[in-house]
Image (cartoon, helix red, strand yellow):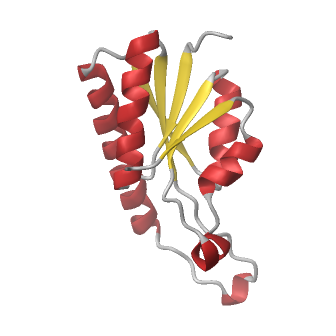
Amino acid sequence: MKPIRSILAATDFSENAEHALTVAIELAGQVGAELHVVHCIDLPVPIFNPYALSIPDSILTQARDESIRLLQKAVKRAEDAGVGAQSHLGDAPAAAAISQLAEELGADLVVMGTRGHTGLKHVLLGSVAERTLRLAPCSVLTVKDD
C-alpha cells in the first residue's frame, strides 16, 4: 500500500464537514501527512444574459472573505494539533474543483463529509461526495457525522 503523504480535506463548513475535518487532522497526524483544506464557491453562470440576475461584487467579496477566514480557522486547528496545513479556495463546481486540486497536489487521499441524503432529496440535490468519488484521482474517504 502506498503511504499517505498528502491529504485533501474538502469542507463546506457544515457540521458534517467539521467532523470530517477532525478525522482528516487526526489521520494526518497519525501518518505524518500534510493537510490541504479546500472550500469551493460555486456560483451559477447565467445562461441568458439579458434575463440573468447578476450577483453584486460586494456579495461575492463578502463570500470569499468569509470563506478565507473560515479556511484560516481550519488551518489553525490543524496546526494546533501539530499538523502542517494549507488552505485553498476553489471557484468551480465543488466535485470538479476538489478532484482537480487533488490531482495538482498529488494528494493521496480526499476526506470529506457526507450528509447521506436518500430518495428524492438525493435526486434533487445530488451529492458532491458521490461526484467526487467518480472524479477524484485518488482514494476518497467519506465521513458521516454519526
Q: Position of residue 84 (x, y in %)?
A: 39, 16
Q: Position of residue 142 (x, y in %)?
A: 54, 42
Residue located at (71% from left, 88% from top): 50
Q: Residue most toward the front?
A: 146
Q: Residue most toward the bottom?
A: 51
In the image, taking residue 82 as reference, residue 124 lies left or right, namely: right
Q: Position of residue 129 (x, y in %)?
A: 61, 51
Q: Is residue 16 above or below residue 140?
A: below
In the image, taking residue 63 as reference, residue 115 lies left or right, namely: right
Residue located at (76% from left, 46% from top): 134
User: Which residue is at the front of the view, 51 or 110?
Assistant: 110
Quarter of the picture holding the N terminus: top right
| Number of numbered markers | 0
Decide if residue 13 is in sight here: no
Q: Position of residue 13 (x, y in %)?
A: 38, 51
The image quarter containing residue 139 is top right
Residue located at (35% from left, 17% from top): 83
Q: Is residue 27 above or below residue 32?
A: below
Residue located at (31% from left, 44% from top): 69
